[in-house]
Amino acid sequence: MEHSNFIKNIIKEDLESGKRNHVITRFPPEPNGYLHIGHAKSIVINFDLADEFNGRTNLRFDDTNPLKEDSEYVEAIKEDVKWLGYDWDGLFFASDYFEEMYNRAVLLINKGKAYVDDLSPDEIRAYRGTLKEPGKDSPYRTRSVEENLDLFERMRNGEFGNGEKVLRAKIDMKSPNINLRDPVIYRISHATHHNTGDKWCIYPMYAFAHPIEDAIEDVTHSICTIEFEDQRPLYNWVVAETEMTASPQQIEFGRLNVTNAVMSKRKLKKLVDEGFVDGWDDPRMPTISGLRRKGYTPEAIRAFVRETGVTKGSGFVDSQMLDFFIREDLKLKAPRTMGILRPLKVVITNYPEGQVEMLDAEINPENPEMGTRQIPFGREIYIEQDDFMEDPPKKYFRLFPGNEVRLKHAYFIKCEDFIKDENGNVVEIHCTYDPETKSGTGFTGRKVKGTLHWVEASQAVPAEFRLFEPLLLNEEPEEAEVKDVADVEANDDAAAETEKSFLDYVNPNSLQVMNGFVEPNMKGVEPQEKFQFFRHGYFNVDPKLTTKDQVVFNEIVSLKSSFKL
Ligand code: ATP
Ligand code: MG
Ligand code: MG
């Protein structure tokens, strides 16, 4: 399925007009957390574009903020990109370019295009003005080239404390574009970096570093999300004024937001750190690792993000659309099986005691090539608690006193009696079966309306089932994130302050754990194997919690939905 989009059109024109003779894209995550499904969109866009135009795609870690970054995240990100099905051409770290970035900053100072400023972060923000009001020059803006060179070198040498000085680009404090009002391009941060250790105590800001990284790698089309649109003039200014030979072009597209989820590593980290989930790969997380553990496949994720399209707008996409694609993907692949989540024992009183027979069951009726399996049937079986009612309402076609139902792959059984415990709970059902009605014999003597799944009791394998509801109860918890280099990077705490509220929407009932039974042929299933449990939905074998004595299944998605593409 080939979708055209505006970025493809730009690249096509660039190649046809001769503006470019090759295509290089990059996926540039900051290793400050695990990737989420929003990143999957960026990954798919970048790799697909290179693929279509015979180009290359780099994986580049944008690691310019030592306080937030960690090599644990580097490894997790590599694993996720590979799992999604992509092979990068070059693997780079922004931090490998620190020396070159420093030299380019010195070049700016020499050209009179950068200066060391002693204003505090708060003062810098106040001097910057607003959309309506022009900014004011810092009193340090007129420092001489010599003084700036000296101070910048001393910043590098560690003579100043955090926040005492910054290096700013000297552009235009009256620009209608606030990003051009002398943005900070270097800050002091005495912190150990995951890659460069203690070699540096000054670090470049995103807006300065990113264009240089792109240009060093000869990235032709630097694709980023829409909130960077206003920074494009600054991006171009940096490429030109630092005299990079390559000329990457920044192109923005709309972020992917998915209902009932937040798409921000910073926010997801909060959910992890504050114990709302059991790690970045908790199946309720919208992370790639969480989706993987829940049981989504790379095929489904890729199909989903492609279907969301590449546009300038960033709306919310219904998470049911992702569920549609996982059903599509698993429909023909996942073996069918039967599992009982809330067991209720049924005794078939006219079935010989001690006898167990083996029945044939198709593995996937939609994909007959998958063949058949053998399942035991005997005098005692488990059914679901809610497949029996003592006093059923109209149109209840499952078991109730006097009613007959079909057991999938087996016989008709009729409810004759039931036993309650001292609390009034039904604990056992007594039925009779009719040997004439055996599945596959073509019995047509009478019809029943209900078909139940079941598991033979003596050979049933205990299993844990985990069912999930959205982690966040607010459908659209993510306000469009305003990226302001100075605010977000230099003053993360201020940004974090405004984000508290999303934790108020955490769903206290997002995880439900049930203990039931599965068919004996499920013994020895492997982590990440996926099944369709008849009448329940698709489930994945949890890779973290499954032990050799206890298999744990995560519900991926229920069987049916009203969602249509
Ligand atoms: P986060 O706030 O989650 O850390 P980010 O934009 O800071 O997001 P980066 O690690 O810098 O994350 O992102 C790497 C790439 O992924 C960037 O090009 C970024 O624009 C893109 N990206 C991040 N989130 C989304 C999203 N929700 N939809 C599409 N692309 C995204
Ligand atoms: Mg970022
Ligand atoms: Mg970020």
Image (spheres, grey):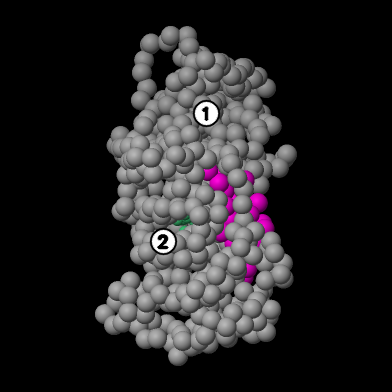
Residue 211 x/y as whole percent: 49, 59
Residue 514 x/y as whole percent: 56, 46
* Residue range corresponding to the magenta coloring: 57-81
Q: Is residue 218 magenta?
A: no
The three-letter code of the residue at mark 2 reads Asn
Tell me if 228 is positioned left or right of 144 in this view.
left
Q: Is residue 195 visible?
A: yes
Mark 2 sits on what residue?
Answer: 236
Q: Is residue 122 visible?
A: no
Determine contact: label 2, label 1, CB under 8 Å. no
In the orientation shown, which residue stands out farthest toward the bottom?
139
Mark 1 sits on what residue?
Answer: 334
What residue is at 41 percent from the left and 54 percent from the top? 250
What residue is at 39 percent from the left and 71 percent from the top? 179
Residue 47 x/y as whole percent: 49, 41
In the orientation shown, which residue stands out farthest toward the left?
132
